[in-house]
C-alpha cells in the first residue's frame, strides 16, 4: 500500500490539489468540498473519495462513491494507484454502494490521448456516459473492486477505543463508522450525543460534536 491517510486541509497535499484542473480556489486551506470524504496522499500523488448524500446529487449516479480528485505526478502507474485507493476506501468505509465508484473526466483538460480516462479503464472502470456538462463518466461496480486494504496510518484513526484513552479525531471517517467503532469497543449510547465509556476508562462519557470531533466529559450532565 502506497497511500497514506490524509485529510482535507493537509498542507502537504495542498500543492498537488492546487495543480489539479478542477481546483476552484487554489491556495485556500481546504481543497475538498464539505461532506463525507477520504483523502489519501502518496509521495507524488493525491486522491480524494467523496460520498455525497444521494438527495443532494444531480447526476445519474447518485449514491455512488465519487473520485473527485486524482493527481499523479510520479511514482507507480496511475491504474495501480487507482486500485490501491479503492482498496483503501473499502477498508475504511466498508461495503461500497450498489453503484460502486464513479469519476468524471474533462477531456479538454487532460493530456491529449485517444481515450481520455485511459488510466481508469486500465483500473477496471467502464465508460458509462456523460454528465449534462459534458464530462465523461467512468464507473467501477462493486464486484470489480479490489479487496480492502488499509492505507498507511489508518490504524491511528480506526483503532478501537481502549479504556483510559480519548477517542481519536476521525477526520476522514464517516459518523456511521465512528459509531460502529464505539459500539465494537463496548461504549454504551446514553443519548444521541452522549456515550458511556467502558468500565475502567475513568470518564463518564463523550460528546459527539457537529463535525465528528469528540470532546471528553467529566459528568453526564455536561452531555447536552
Image: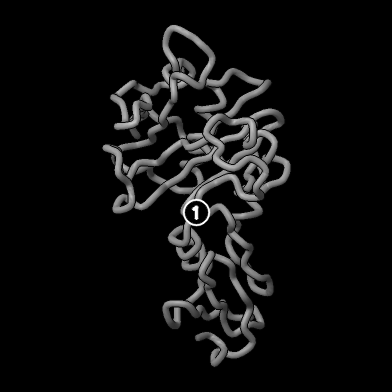
Name the secondary structure under disc 1: loop
Which residue is found at the position 60% from the left and 57% from the top? 159
Q: Given the current orientation, which residue lies at the most extreme left position?
A: 60
Which residue is found at the position 52% from the left and 73% from the top? 208
150 sits to left or right of 12? left
Which residue is found at the position 42% from the left and 39% from the top? 66
Residue 58 location, quadrant = top left
Residue 220 location, quadrant = bottom right
Q: Given the current orientation, which residue lies at the most extreme bottom position?
A: 221
Please tell me which residue lies in front, 127 or 151: 127
The residue to which callout 1 is attached is 34
Say above or below: 42 vs 91. Answer: above
Which residue is found at the position 49% from the left and 54% from the top? 34
Say above or below: 194 vs 19. Answer: below
Q: Give coordinates of residue 92: x percent, y percent.
A: 50, 47
Please tell me which residue lies in front, 117 or 156: 117
Q: Give coordinates of residue 205: x percent, y percent.
A: 56, 81
Q: Name the quadrant of the N terminus.
A: top right
Please tell me which residue lies in front, 86 or 162: 86
Q: Give coordinates of residue 217: x percent, y percent.
A: 62, 83
Amino acid at each position: 500500500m502506497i497511500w497514506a491517510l490524509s485529510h482535507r486541509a493537509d498542507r502537504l497535499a495542498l500543492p498537488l490539489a492546487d495543480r489539479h484542473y478542477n481546483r476552484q480556489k487554489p491556495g485556500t486551506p481546504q481543497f475538498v468540498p464539505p461532506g463525507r470524504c477520504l483523502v489519501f496522499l502518496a509521495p507524488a500523488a493525491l486522491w480524494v473519495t467523496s460520498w455525497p448524500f444521494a438527495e443532494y446529487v444531480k447526476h445519474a449516479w447518485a449514491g455512488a462513491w465519487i473520485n473527485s480528485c486524482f493527481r499523479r505526478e510520479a511514482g507507480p502507474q496511475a491504474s495501480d494507484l487507482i486500485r490501491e485507493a479503492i482498496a483503501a476506501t473499502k477498508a475504511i468505509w466498508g461495503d461500497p454502494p450498489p453503484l460502486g465508484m464513479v469519476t468524471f473526466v474533462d477531456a479538454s483538460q487532460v493530456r491529449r490521448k485517444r481515450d481520455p480516462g485511459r488510466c481508469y479503464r486500465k483500473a477496471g472502470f467502464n465508460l458509462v456516459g456523460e454528465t449534462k456538462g459534458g464530462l465523461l463518466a467512468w464507473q467501477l461496480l462493486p464486484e470489480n473492486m479490489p479487496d480492502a486494504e488499509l492505507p498507511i496510518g489508518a490504524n491511528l484513526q480506526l483503532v478501537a477505543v481502549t479504556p483510559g484513552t480519548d477517542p481519536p479525531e476521525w477526520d476522514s471517517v464517516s459518523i456511521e463508522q465512528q459509531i460502529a467503532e464505539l459500539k465494537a469497543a463496548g461504549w454504551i449510547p446514553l443519548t444521541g450525543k452522549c456515550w458511556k465509556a467502558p468500565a475502567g476508562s475513568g470518564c463518564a462519557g463523550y460528546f459527539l460534536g457537529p463535525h465528528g470531533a469528540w470532546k471528553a466529559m467529566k459528568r453526564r450532565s455536561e452531555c447536552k
